[in-house]
Image: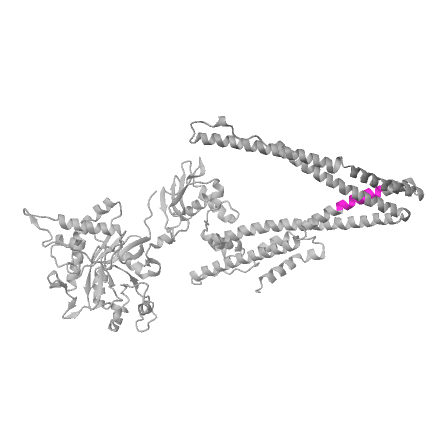
Amino acid sequence: MGQYQGMRWFKADFQVQTPEDSKHWSDTDLRLGNPRRPKIDGVYDESEISRKAQAFLRRCHELELQIIGITDHNFSGQTDPRDWFLTHLIEQNKSVAAELGREMLHILPGFEVDIGYHVLCLFSPAKKSSDLERVNKVLIQLGLPESSRFERGLPTPLRREDSPISLAKLLKIVQDDNDGIVIAAHADQEDGLLQRPSNRLDYQLPNLLALEVTQYPLGQKISDILTGKNRDWARPGKQPAYVQSSDAKSLKVDESGNPKPNSLGYRYTWVKCSRPSISALKQAFLDSDSRISLGKTSPSEGETFPRIVSITVKGLKYLEDQTVNFSRNLNTLIGARGTGKSTILELLRIMFARDETGAISEKARLKAQRAKQTFTPDTEILVEWEGIPGQVDVLRYSPSDDLSLIAGAAHDLSAYLRHLPIQFYSQQQLSELTAPGGQSQLLELIDEICAAQLEKLQGEERTVAADIKRLFAAQDQMRAIEHELDGLKQELVEIDRQWQARKDVQGEAAAYQRATHAKRYFQNLSDGFEKDVSEVEKTLESLTPAGGHPAAVTEAWPHSRWFTEQTAKVATYRAAYQQKLDALLTEMRNDFATLFSENQQWHEISADLDAAHSNFIAACAAKGVQPSDVSRLQELDRTRQTKQRSLEDKELQWKALEKTPEELEESLNRLFGIWAEQCWLRQQTALEITEKTKKTIRVTITPMANRLEFMLLWGTLEPDRRSRVGREWDGIGDYLVSVRSLPS
């Protein structure tokens, strides 16, 4: 796929001196000879000046410069273009770039002149010698022929009739007549434009589009001027852009490898444009807030958001085969009706599986269907998606293979596509966002913008909501248990009353009950001990032999002898554990027999407890209680014990659920808190949209104000319409919405 050639950030140094200006150039190893092209056997030798030009260009590439403005003082005093250092920079530009595998430098030829303060004059990128000759002629037009440009090695100020040429005149000749650009050099320094009140009128010239500063961040004085806060310097309309440049007079670096002051690349500017040119610079200076940056790194390095890199289409009915490479920033598809603008959008919607979701309207779905009607058996669509910087996935569609991921990784393609942070809105859909009933689609757009922060809250919301459902179920269970407890307690009261009605045998009955409870208690002790014995027995049975055997160790293994010894030790320890468990089991069985089955004292006590039952039966007979009554008493006793056990079990269950109401209240409060946080996050996002669009777009988000969605949910709870509440159900819902929408 092709490379994006649209708007991007270029690293630029607009004020670069070269060895052309020997008076100011400080590197002796790059200074030009005299003559610059010595004659050898009657032929001019340009090897030395070409070698130095190559070294200069290589240093530019090492610094990753992409645009350089060559601004030697008064251009050059040489009359032969072959003696200009800049000529050899232009000629060597392509070969050096190819050698380093980089794009050619965009070299803006120009000069620095003194009109009472220093200014830079730059012209369109030079590709051939004639481009440089045109720049030289501009300086002649300004009144400085080659012979008058230097006196005793120092550059001559730009003057006419013994007076400095005005900035207005310079702007007209350079910018209007010769398609160049003028930048006020080191304007914040002593010899700069901004240091003298007499220069205010020059600063206020609307055609002065840019000036250069040496300090950044700006000092307060310079900042006040450049932001229009200083009324004395204020100028109508837009303030000029400000840039930084190295004012290079050397290629030297310090001990850390960084450019020294006034060395190439010491200061630089990031410029955003499609293709460097004077026109592009003018546009960048006029829109400096978005196209000029003085940061240390490229602004594009901060653009880490996911993006669509490109789409390639082949074999469509009404759209020619092509690749569209997208900018990291705003993209605009421009064309007449029927040229395929909407088709590209719908194809992207299809490729990211956003054509069948429930969030889009029926009209939008039909548009996607119409785009599919342009497919042929030979159709192929490729989309490059960059989720994180440098990691590009490629989606492919063809009628035979459907949608697939041919570069990248996805466990499940549908889940992969579903989680991509991307939305599509046609012009019609954008209109629907602000139409009545468009709140849900607008909210989806807002949610996508703050998806990263919202996702965490939504995950917590799902967890809390699931817990609330569990707590509601637990609360229902708790109420059911309370109902059962009330019934059991009432039944026990009735049984006790029946016991009280048989007062004649009350004493014996009470003694019998106590004896029964004591016997049951001892039986529970026995059952518990026996269970412990059984658990130890199961543990002993489940203890498997050691996992390894010395014979399983291969002599070829590293340290095989050590593995053999360890295997034997493990087997020995495990065997010892089995013996200890076996001994423990035997001891527990003996203790069980001593405590329970062979306990002579228990046999005596048990007989005594059984006697209480016999005494009770005898007392009933003595008191004239009928056998059927005695049988009833026994049944009542068994029933009472069963009910009592049920009561105890239910009380334990209720105890486990005792804190459910408090937990439910806490979870509901947390859910309401999460909703409030989500609403606040959406409100902040809406406010940011409003501020960034300078209130062109205004979005207001109010909690619980989506009447349509609320009434749909409210309707699912609707009671019988024939009832009084049912007849007023919609009115109640409207009232609740209005109350929730009022500011607190």
The magenta segment: 634-646
| Residue pictured at 91% horizontal, 47% vertical | 504
| Residue 448 in the image, given as x and y percentages of width and height | 48, 52
For residue 643: magenta?
A: yes
Rendered-image quadrant of the C terminus = bottom right
- In the depicted structure, whether residue 657 falls above or below residue 157: above
Describe residue 702's horizontal placement relative to residue 648 as left or right. Answer: left
Between residue 489 and residue 346, name the one nearer to us.
489
Is residue 337 visible to us here? yes
| Residue pictured at 63% horizontal, 61% vertical | 735
Between residue 425 and residue 132, name the one nearer to us.
132
Is residue 287 visible to us here? no
Rendered-image quadrant of the N terminus = top left
Res 605 → quadrant: top right
Total marks shown come to 0
| Residue 742 in the image, given as x and y percentages of width and height | 58, 64
**Could you tell me what secondary structure mostly forms the magenta stretch?**
helix
Q: Which residue is farthest top?
A: 551
Res 542 → quadrant: top right
For residue 621: magenta?
A: no
Coloration of the structure image: one colour
Between residue 586 and residue 668, name the one nearer to us.
586
Describe residue 355's horizontal placement relative to residue 200 as left or right. Answer: right
Describe residue 315's horizontal placement relative to residue 544 as left or right. Answer: left
| Residue 115 in the image, given as x and y percentages of width and height | 19, 67
| Residue 197 in the image, given as x and y percentages of width and height | 26, 73
Between residue 568 and residue 523, name the one nearer to us.
568
